[in-house]
Amino acid sequence: REPSWKKRRENRWRELSVQLRNYLARNPSDLSVRFAYAGVLLRADHVEAARQEYDQLRALAPSYEGLAELGQAIAGKETLMAVDVSNA
């Protein structure tokens, strides 16, 4: 059984991701919010969605500050997920 603090944290990330997604639907060119959204998705363990946002941000602004670090963080989570699957 998951601890209640973990559920609360996941709910906060989920709520924030919904708010950011809605904002981006109205303001798709806001790169700073797109970057934040990718980070929130990653923290919420929505790695594939984070990768999609990262790829879109990279296409729009390849030199965006912090983009390389975000890509590394996503790649790290993808690696952990691959290891988890192979150990299952």
Image: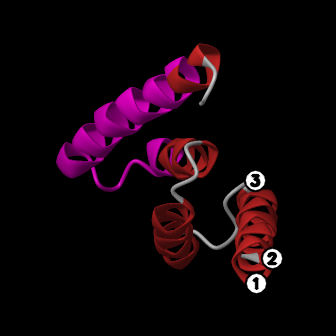
- Is 56 or 3 nearer to us in this picture? 3
As measured in the structure, the alpha-carbon distance from the residue carrying label 1 to the one carrying label 2 is 5 Å
Q: Residues within 10 Å of mark 3 (few under 14, many from 20)?
A: few
Say whether marks 1 and 2 touch (CB < 8 Å).
Answer: yes
Rendered location of residue 72, percent (x, y): 81, 66
* Amino acid beneath label 2: Val
Please, is residue 31 above or below residue 12 in the view?
Answer: below
Q: Residue at x 41, y 29 (%)?
A: 16
Q: Which element carries disc 1, helix, strand or loop? A: helix
Q: Are marks 3 and 2 in contact (CB under 8 Å)?
A: no
Residue 20: quadrant of the picture = top left
Q: Residues within 10 Å of mark 2 (few under 14, many from 20)?
A: few
Residue assigned mark 2: 83
Residue drawn at (53%, 75%) of the image: 55
Alpha carbon separation for disc pair 3 and 2: 26 Å
Instruction: Measure the alpha-carbon separation of dots 3 and 1.
Output: 30 Å
Question: Which SS type dominates the magenta stretch?
Answer: helix
Is residue 24 magenta-colored?
yes
Tell me the tag on residue 86.
1
**Residue displayed at 60% across by 47% down:** 39
| Residue 47, horizontal then vertical, whole percent | 57, 63
Q: Secondary structure at mark 2?
A: helix
Residue shown at 39% from the left, 47% from the top: 30
Residue 87 vs residue 80, the one in the foreground:
87
Q: Position of residue 52 (x, y in %)?
A: 47, 72
Give the residue type that dot 1 points to. Answer: Ser
Span shown in magenta = 8-34
Along the polypeptide, which appears first: circle 3 or circle 1? 3
Q: What mark, if any, has residue 66 been given in the picture?
A: 3
